[in-house]
Image (cartoon, rainbow, N blue to C red):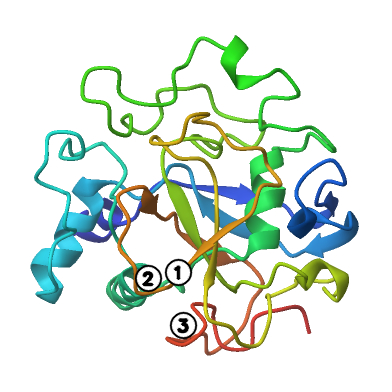
Amino acid sequence: MPGEKKELLPQTVSIPEGSFLMGDDRGQDNEKPVHRVWVGAFLLGRFPLTNKEYALFVAESGLPEPPFCRRQMFSHPDKPVAGVSWHDAVAYCRWLSKRSGKPFRLPTEAEWERAARGGLEGKLYPWGDEPPWERSYPGYDIETGGPERVGQNEPNGFGLSDMSEGVHEWCGDFYDPAYYQISPERNPQGPACGQRRASRGGSWRHRIKFSRCTARSSLNPAFKYADYGFRLAMSLEHRTPIQVNSDTGHPAGDGPT
């Protein structure tokens, strides 16, 4: 059907190439030192991937559905898919890339943080420095206690929603708390190896539901936690051929040439 591929593709936002100050000297040790980073232009999902979008992948791939998806707290089609491992997220990227002909992947930590800031250099949150507890959005579904449906809060300056709240979002990088000390300036991809994968964003189950733009988290890539999801990314630099590397979650040869 002519509209089939369009229906497959989550909404994305174009993030222009540019540099920004990554990290926060006021934050945890793993957010230091603040350092200048340049990232190439890329697309990022306007929202975290939803249950509705993930369900087609499950139906076609035959892989198990997320372990929490039938509970009322998580089951609404427009809620972010939760309980997916890093490997599940990468498998979805490979599936969608093959179905759409577009090289989808997980974002790097650097891309994620640049996007979350929405052009607000040095601010704590995607909306600025106002504390989240002084805002009108609770950061969770007040009826069920689980994550809220995507897009309920206002978007940031790039038009992205839920960058600070909802579910933790898997990134492609391996995680190293000291990586910023050796991170390259251009398109950092994270460490070459590691035991955990990096993640970003807030969580519906935390006491404070909203995370700062610079806050880093990580998890064993095989774990399926009820507050872990993901959003899609895609490089905009022209490369051919482009294939998603199943070990790293990034396109082969990612980075400027």
Whether pointer 3 and pointer 2 mark residues with C-beta atoms closer than 8 Å, the reply is yes
Amino acid type assigned to the residue bearing label 2 in the image: Cys
Q: At x 51% / y 9%, what residue is drawn? A: 136
Q: Which residue is mark 2?
A: 93
Q: Which residue is mark 3?
A: 244
Whole-percent x, y for residue 244 in the image: 46, 82
Amino acid type assigned to the residue bearing label 1 in the image: Phe
How many numbered markers are drawn? 3
Q: At x 70% / y 60%, what residue is drawn? A: 110
Which numbered disc flags the more N-terminal residue, 1 or 2?
2
Disc ID at residue 6: none
Along the line of sight, which residue is nearer the eye, 224 or 103? Answer: 224
Whole-percent x, y for residue 154 in the image: 52, 22
Which numbered disc flags the more N-terminal residue, 3 or 2?
2
Q: CA distance from mark 1 to mark 2?
A: 5 Å
Along the line of sight, which residue is nearer the eye, 132 or 126? Answer: 132
Q: CA distance from mark 3 to mark 1?
A: 7 Å
Q: Quadrant of the N terminus?
A: bottom left
Whether pointer 3 and pointer 1 mark residues with C-beta atoms closer than 8 Å, the reply is yes
Q: At x 15% / y 48%, what residue is drawn? A: 69
What element does badge 1 sit on?
loop
Whether pointer 1 and pointer 2 mark residues with C-beta atoms closer than 8 Å, the reply is yes
Side (left or right) of 47 relative to 149: right
Along the line of sight, which residue is nearer the eye, 139 or 43? Answer: 139
In which image quadrant can residue 132 be found?
top right
